Amino acid sequence: MFNRRLLIDSGGQQTYSVLEIHVDTPDGGHVRSARVELTYNGESNLANTDNKGIAVFYGVPTGTEISYTITAAGYNAARGKWIIPTDAEYETEYVVLSPPVNYNFELTIGQNYDVEMGFYQSGFFKNDFGRISPAQFMQHTIEKVGIDAIMDTMTGMYTANTLTVALTGDTRSSISQITIYVANSMYTLNTVIYNGGVTYYSLEMLEDTTVIDYFDRRNGRTVDIQLIDQ
């Protein structure tokens, strides 16, 4: 049984409460061993959910903004903010974690290669070359799915090799990163930049030329890829 005693300051006002957090799946199941992080007053507090998907925090300040991040293997993270009312001695919050969803696409590969400059692009680039179907990801228009690379023409080595998915609009708050399955490999694009009305999700591939080689051998052909919301 939980302790529901209020903590009272010298002025007779409630300052702290108990916060009970339920973490469930969309179908009502419980998420066990989810990591729950609360941040308030510049400090972080951690707990894991029990077999019923519940985490309990004691001595949580009322009337104060509390930021939370909840993560669990096999689920998208949940983030948000709460403020416990000053008259609440025991507060209960419910959070639903959803599993990542795979979205299937047909990518017709196009290429642009400047031999003299060593500049290479391959994949789908809106209004330039390549195609993708469907042309939206999570209701956002896809601007780009492809590789940008720069080769040192003297050595044949790549000095840049970036895999990018770009979406129209500022999608940073709804899509924190994108995982792409291509060339029998999965890559998580977690460098996120918003510029000129487009959000770019990218990963510097360094010396990994798997995707470049895969696209190069299939120029003009259509291949299956997956984008995964995370």
Image (spheres, rainbow, N blue to C red):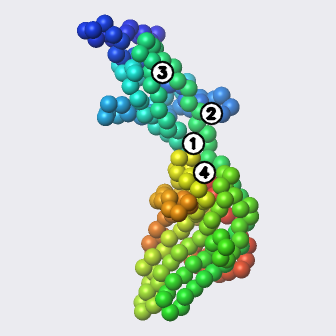
Crowdedness near tag 3: few (<14), some (14–19) or many (≥20) residues, C-alpha within 10 Å: some
- Residue beneath disc 1: 75
Label 4 Cα neighbours within 10 Å, binned few <14 / some 14-19 / many ≥20? some
Q: CA distance from mark 1 to mark 4?
A: 10 Å
Residue placed under numbered mark 3 in the picture: 20
* Label 2, label 1: how far apart the Cα atoms are: 9 Å
In front of the other: 14 or 155? 14
Q: Do the numbered discs 2 and 4 sit on residues whose CB atoms are within 8 Å?
A: no
Circle nearer the N terminus (3, 1): 3
Q: Which mark is residue 229?
A: 4
Q: Amino acid at mark 2?
A: Thr
When the figure is inspected, residue 99 is found, relative to residue 44, above or below; the finding is below
Q: Is residue 1 visible?
A: yes
Question: Which numbered disc, 2 or 1, marks the residue that appears first in the sequence?
Answer: 2
- Amino acid residing under circle 3: Glu
Question: In the image, which is nearer the foreground, mark 3 or mark 1?
Answer: 3
Report helix, strand or loop for mark 1.
loop
Dot 2 alpha-carbon crowd within 10 angstroms: few under 14, some 14 to 19, many 20 or more: some
Q: Which quarter of the picture shows residue 96? A: top right
Cα–Cα span, label 3 and label 1:
21 Å
Badge nearest the viewer, 1 or 4: 4
- Residue contact between numbered discs 4 and 3, judged by CB atoms under 8 Å: no
| Residue drawn at point x = 42 percent, y = 92 percent | 154
Residue at 53% of width from left, 75% of height from top?
148
Label 4 – label 3 distance at C-alpha: 28 Å
Residue 109 seen: no
The label on residue 25 is 2
Left or right of 141? Residue 64 is left
Which residue lies at the image location 41% right of the left edge and 15% below the top edge?
Answer: 86
